[in-house]
Image (cartoon, coloured by chain):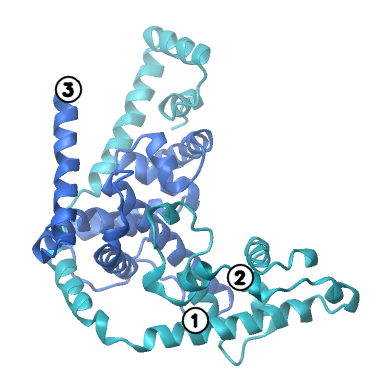
Chain colours: A blue, B cyan
Amino acid sequence: LSKGCYTIFGWILLEDKELVLKYLNGDENSFNLLARKHQKNIYWHALRMTGNYDDAMEITQQVLLLMYNKLSTFKFNSALSTWIYKITHTRSLNLLRKNNLKRLIRLGNEHDFVQSDENIFKSTEAKEKVEIVLKQLQKLPKKQREVFILKNFEDMKYSEISEITGQSVGALKANYFHALKKIIELTDEI
Amino acid sequence: MKYDDRIYKYLSSTLNNSDKEKFEKDLEHSNELREQLNSVKLSLNNFVETSKVDINDTLITNNFIALKNSQNSSPRLKFKLSYGLTVFLIVFVSSTIYFFNNESIQSDIDLNLSNIDDSLLINWVSEKNILETESELYDLSITSSEVDIFTEFLSDPNITLTDIELIISEEEIQYLSEKLKINKIL
C-alpha cells in the first residue's frame, strides 16, 4: 500500500513538475492547467485565514500572478504545493496585518467580515455553510487558526506545517491543542 | 459539554508517551471517556465537512486572466513603489531621530546607507521581485508588500507621530535598524 501511495504521490509531483517545465518552455496552456489545479486550494486557504471573500480573491490573484512570474525560480526542493501554500500563507498574514494597521490608525477600512456580494459559491446554502465555519475560525488567534486550518482542511503533518509557518513542531502542537479545544467548545454552543 | 482535557492533548499529540499509554488504557475501560473522544472527533469532522462546498472556480480563472493580461500595462507601479520607498525611508529616519530627540543618542547613530543590501532595495521597490529565489520564501520577516503598506500610510500628509508609532512595531524597527546599520539607537 505504501508503495502504491508513493507511486501515486510521486505521479502527482511529477505532473506538477512536468507542467512547470512545459510552461517555462513557453507552453502557456500548462500554466493554465497548473492554475486550475491549485486555485481552489489557494482560495480556500486565504478565505479561512482572512475570513473575507474579497481578500481571499485578491490573494488568489496575487499568488497566481506571482506563480506566473516567478515559477522559473522554483527549484523543486519542496513540493510545489508547499511553495504555493507558503506564498498564500504569507500573503494572508500580510493582508491581515494591513487590515489591522488600517484599523489602528482609523482610516475607516474596518475588516468587515464576509460582506462581499461576490458570487463565488454555487448556491446560497453553500455560502451560508461556509460562513458558519469562517465565523468560528476568526474567533481563534492567528497562530492557532493557521495550524488548525493546515492540519484539518489541508491534511498536513506538523512537519509540513512547520515548513510553511516557520513555527517549531512543539509550538504547533501546543497551538493546535488550544485551537481544537476552542473550536469544539464553539461548535458545541451552536 | 465539559470534555476531558486529555482528549485534546491526545488528538494534538501533546501527551507524552507514558500519559498517552495511560490514556489509551483508560479508553479501554471507560465508556464515558470513549464517548467523549468520539463526540469530539465527530464535532471536528462535522466542522471540517461543513465547509467543503462547491465554488465557481471559473470566476477565479477569469479574474486571473484579466489580471495577467493587464499586468504589463502598469508602468507606474515601479515609479510609485520607488517614490513610496524614498518617502518611507525619509519619514522613518526623521521620525526615529525625532522620537529619540536627544543629541547624545543621535550622535551614536551609525547610519551608513552604503551598507544597505542592494537585494533588499530591489525587493522593496518592486512587488514583482518579492521572491527572487525559492530560499527567500523562508525568510520573509518583512516583505515588499509590507513596506508598501508603510509607504501607503507614511506618504499621507496628515499622518502624525502617534500614527507612525502605531505602524512600526518594535520588531519592525529592530529589523529595519539592522538593515540600515543603526543598531546603537536601540
Identity of the residue drawn at 32% across and 43% down: A78
* Location of residue B109 (image quadrant): bottom right
Amino acid at dot 2? Ile
Residue B17 vs B169, above or below: the answer is above
| Residue A39 rendering spot, x and y as whole percentages | 21, 58
Residue B60 shown left or right of residue B15 in the figure? left
Per the image, the residue denoted by label 3 is: A3
Amino acid at dot 3? Lys
* Mark nearer the viewer, 1 or 2: 2
Residue A127 or residue A173, whichever sits in front: A173
Per the image, the residue denoted by label 1 is: A108
Identity of the residue drawn at 49% across and 81% down: A108
Q: Which mark is residue B116?
A: 2
Q: Secondary structure at mark 3?
A: helix
Q: Secondary structure at mark 2?
A: loop
Q: Identify the subunit bearing mark 2.
A: B
| Residue A136 rendering spot, x and y as whole percentages | 39, 51
Identity of the residue drawn at 42% across and 75% down: B126
Same chain for the residues under marks 3 and 1 in the image: yes
Q: Are marks 3 and 1 in contact (CB under 8 Å)?
A: no
Amino acid at dot 1? Gly
Task: Bin the neighbour count of mark 1 within 10 Å (Cα to Cα): few under 14, some 14-19, many 20 and up.
Answer: few
Q: Earlier in the sequence, mark 3 or mark 1?
A: 3
| Residue A103 rendering spot, x and y as whole percentages | 53, 73
Residue A190 or residue A85, whichever sits in front: A85
Task: Bin the neighbour count of mark 3 within 10 Å (Cα to Cα): few under 14, some 14-19, many 20 and up.
Answer: few
Is there any visible trace of residue B181 in the rendered image?
yes
Task: Bin the neighbour count of mark 2 within 10 Å (Cα to Cα): few under 14, some 14-19, many 20 and up.
Answer: some
